[in-house]
Image (tube, helix red, strand yellow):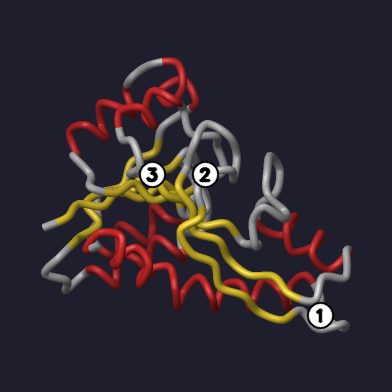
Amino acid sequence: MKRVVIFASGSGSNAENLIKFFHNSDNASVVQVLTNNPHAKVLDRCKKLNVSALSFNRIAFTKTEDVLNILKSSNPDLIILAGFLWKFPENILNQFPNKVINIHPALLPKYGGKGMYGMNVHEAVVKNKETETGITIHYVNENYDEGAIIFQAKCDVLPNDSAQDVASKIHELEMEYFPKVVDQLLNG
């Protein structure tokens, strides 16, 4: 049985989708969710879904090996960043090479980098009159949104779409493709 750990910072809709997807799986399960936000809605979702969830602070993440030690004890086959907003520290990346992936709400390399997350991305897409956008699932390295691309899915951006319209389209792509791609990675 493959073991998955998810990092999230906010509402946790992608985390919940992944937990539910693997709930009855014979191949994998989400064993833990970690968050940098002690008030994140993902904690409530995990409680309802009976999945272990912990919050941590920046010191535990970047200055000590506390989070690394939690990960070592969880022994994950894959670490998934699902709406996690902090840059991932090199000590964790070095300990889990090619085992950390992220989902980004744009077609990288466009609209990636520091500060490009959530509505910031969708507003930029609309402002620049893009005709398409999408999601990118990629490996995580020491730089924001620069790891090797695993998968992309596209959707149209219509001339009168608002940033909220784009966000809804992106959310649909995330819900449809993220669990399938994770499953393929775990079993490929």
| Side of 74 where 90 appears, left or right | right
In percent of width and height, residue 167 lies at 67, 71
Q: Earlier in the sequence, mark 3 or mark 2?
A: 3
Q: In the image, which is nearer the foreground, mark 1 or mark 2?
A: 2
In percent of width and height, residue 4 lies at 26, 52
Q: Earlier in the sequence, mark 1 or mark 2?
A: 2
| Side of 43 where 155 appears, left or right | right
Which quadrant: the N terminus? bottom left
| Side of 118 where 30 appears, left or right | left
- Residue designated by label 2: 147
Q: In the image, which is nearer the foreground, mark 3 or mark 2?
A: 2
Which residue is depicted at the point 32% across and 23% down? Answer: 66
- Residue designated by label 1: 161
State whether residue 99 is above or below residue 135: above
Which residue is depicted at the point 73% across and 75% down? Answer: 132
Q: Earlier in the sequence, mark 1 or mark 3?
A: 3
- Residue designated by label 3: 100
